[in-house]
Amino acid sequence: MRYMMNYDLTETIRVTNQWLGATAEAMGSYPATGLFPNPMFQVIRAWGDVTQRSFSRMVIKPDWDIQSVLNYDGRDNVVSVEPVLKKPFGDLVQFKVQGRPARTRRILLVAPMSGHYATLLRSTVQSLLADADVWVTDWHNARDIPVSEGKFDVDDYTLYLADFIRHLGPDTHVIAVCQPVPLALAATAYLAAEDPKAQPKTLTLIGGPVDPDANPSDVTDFGRRVTMGQLEKSVIQRVGFKYAGAGRMVYPGLLQLTSFISMNAEKHLSAFTNQIIAEAKGEARDNDRHNKFYDEYLAVMDMTAEFYLSTVERIFKQRDIALNRFTVNGTPVDIGAITNVAVFVVEGEEDDISAPGQCLAALPLLTGLPDAKKSSHLEPGAGHYGIFAGRSWRNNIRPLVLNFIDENSGIDGPRRTVNAPAVEKADMKETPLSGARHATPV
């Protein structure tokens, strides 16, 4: 009960701040305030508007908001998001482009489960849709999953990935981003041993901690600084009665968000202060740069306690993947069993979450894979978000990934590639959150 009270107390604080913001906005918006030429009323209204919006976004799953994609013939094709394989802890969703023949590139984008929703990869999806059919792992918020559905740890995550890949077939090209990189590697190795015909055609690993000790960072060192007992006692809570997952042990998204913000408190304070001033002056817009970024950044989800704890223990502390001793429900998974899946590793030179070398550590583990099927790229000057959703991704990395897919697709003939659609021009490294980092290893 102690853990449930902590969870509900955090939610109570969030709701109270949302209410205070809405109240301040209403008070500052009364027509009668126009009789008093005092700018404080505009500041109160602006503070309320920014506060109410910020705290209300924390419990709302963002929409994908991808309406259409530009086709080769210059026409816009409508995009719909459709689940093709539903599971209790996550769905496999397809971005179906209406009226367009199927693309020869079939890409499964493995989204992180690290506190944010899969929509964090919105711009990545949008940039790929013009040239490929795209599927994404859409993980569910643990607070909304009844306890009766059972556990979900790194073993289950790996099996989910194996099932998704198996469902899409052997012509699939898997791209894993950040946290799922080591588990996507393990899932591919698992299929290599258990169901070789279901293996993907290629595997692209972007900025993930295959070996956290290869180049330790502040984030990956976190797993070394605390014991598992300390971690469980300090961050694990039980979902309150308000949600369908009442009673489930989780690592709360709001707690993760607090850690996120505290690591860059000055930058966040400056960003929100500037937004309040802009709102008071009437210069802010509903979909301006600040709101677009924070609507996504503040929307967080809970992770199951067993997934969070097993990730810290097995990936970061014990380094099961790095030492090639990972198991799935007791079955050993040998990374060396991968013999015909081409692997491409992408890292960012300025990545302070998964520092250069951590992801590259995957290639030496692939002892059964010919060197001709191993590739890597270090993007100069790129931070963590830039290598999958920013300028570096659009201008440099995306073309490299598509060329890698084509070279290892087994299909003769050139492919036509168009420029990435115009999405957010500045990568997240250049937003008010410049230098942002994850607060924990996942």
Image (tube, rainbow, N blue to C red):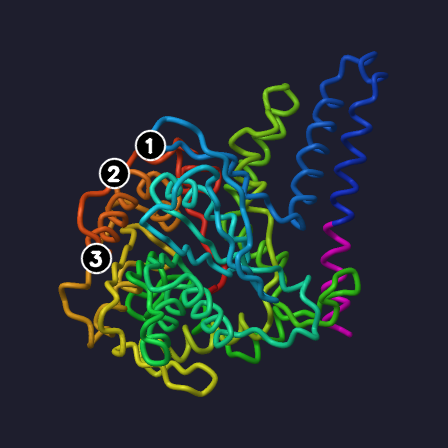
Mark nearer the N terminus (2 vs 1): 1
The amino acid type found where label 2 is placed reads Arg
- Earlier sequence position, callout 2 versus callout 3: 3
| Residue picked out by circle 3 | 410
Q: Is residue 276 above or below residue 66?
A: above
Camera-nearest residue between 290 and 33: 290
SS state under label 1? loop
Disc 2 to disc 3, how far (Cα)? 16 Å
Q: Tell me the amino acid under the disc marked 3.
A: Gly
Residue 49 horizontal/vertical position (percent): 70, 32
Question: Label 3 near label 2: C-beta < 8 Å?
Answer: no
Q: Amino acid at mark 1?
A: Tyr
Q: In which quadrant of the rendered view does residue 125 lie?
A: top left
The part of the image, by quadrant, that contains residue 424 is top left
Residue placed under numbered mark 2 in the picture? 416
- Residue at 41% x, 39% y is 100
Q: Residue furthest bottom?
A: 330
- Looking at the rendered structure, the secondary structure element under dot 3 is loop
SS majority, magenta = helix
